[in-house]
């Protein structure tokens, strides 16, 4: 699956959820929805870090169940994709994301992700599109690195995500 398809699949899922839940986003307010997505992404990334216990050097967990890692990773990815769709960053593709050598530890990758989330939020809030798009691409690159550290491939993630969306929306 290519990245544009992933953005489209996510948009279809969000639209389905909005229709089923009869959620009125206008009542929440544009500014609250903007902040909600970024906060939710930070929380989901934090939950993933907590699952790995990588921040506790005396308690690093090995051999975590792949299913749990996949579920948490996809939970975070939903908000990453949502931010991409809302801010029109959905023009990127896997080839446009600069892939760098992954010599960083999982701790550094998590730290970079939190840093880039803040950067994307700040730049997007100030409507600096090109800089926020570049920051988003860095964020997505780190997110892909994180998958590797967790023993997940993007192909597995995309396949699982698409099948999950198919189950939710009943549209496959």
Image (cartoon, grey):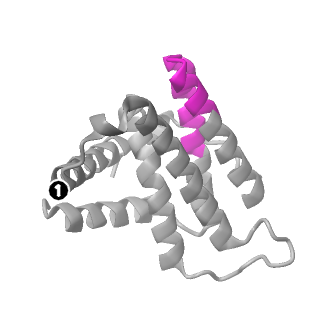
Q: Is residue 91 visible?
A: no
The residue at the far front in this view is 27
Question: Residue 122: within the magenta?
Answer: yes
Q: Position of residue 26 (x, y in %)?
A: 28, 34
Mark 1 is surrounded, within 10 Å at the Cα level, by few (under 14), some (14 to 19) or many (20 or more) other residues, namely few
Q: In the figure, residue 30 lies in which quadrant?
A: top left
The total number of labels drawn is: 1
* Residue 68, above or below 113: below
Residue at 13%, 59% in the rendered image: 171
Q: Nearer the viewer, residue 144 or 64?
A: 64
Quadrant of the frame with the C terminus = bottom left
Task: Give the residues drawn in magenta, as a range.
Answer: 119-141
* Residue 13, above or below 166: above
Q: Position of residue 58 (x, y in %)?
A: 86, 77
Residue at 42%, 33% in the rendered image: 92
Could you tell whether 121 is left or right of 172 in the image? right
On the image, numbered disc 1 is attached to which residue? 20
């Amino acid at each position: 699956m290519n990245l544009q398809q992933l953005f489209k699949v996510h948009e279809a899922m969000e639209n389905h959820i909005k229709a089923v839940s009869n959620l009125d986003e206008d009542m929440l307010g544009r500014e609250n929805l903007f902040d909600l997505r970024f906060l939710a992404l930070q929380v989901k990334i934090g939950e993933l870090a907590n699952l790995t216990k990588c921040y506790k050097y005396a308690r690093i967990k090995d051999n975590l169940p792949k299913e749990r890692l996949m579920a948490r990773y996809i939970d975070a990815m939903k908000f990453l994709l949502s931010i991409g769709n809302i801010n029109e960053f959905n023009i990127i593709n896997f080839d446009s994301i600069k892939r760098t050598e992954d010599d960083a530890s999982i701790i550094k990758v998590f730290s970079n992700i939190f840093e880039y989330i803040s950067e994307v939020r700040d730049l997007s809030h100030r409507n600096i599109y090109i800089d926020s798009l570049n920051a988003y691409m860095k964020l997505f690159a780190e997110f892909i690195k994180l998958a590797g550290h967790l023993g997940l491939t993007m192909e597995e993630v995309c396949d699982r995500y698409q099948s999950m969306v198919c189950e939710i929306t009943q549209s496959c």
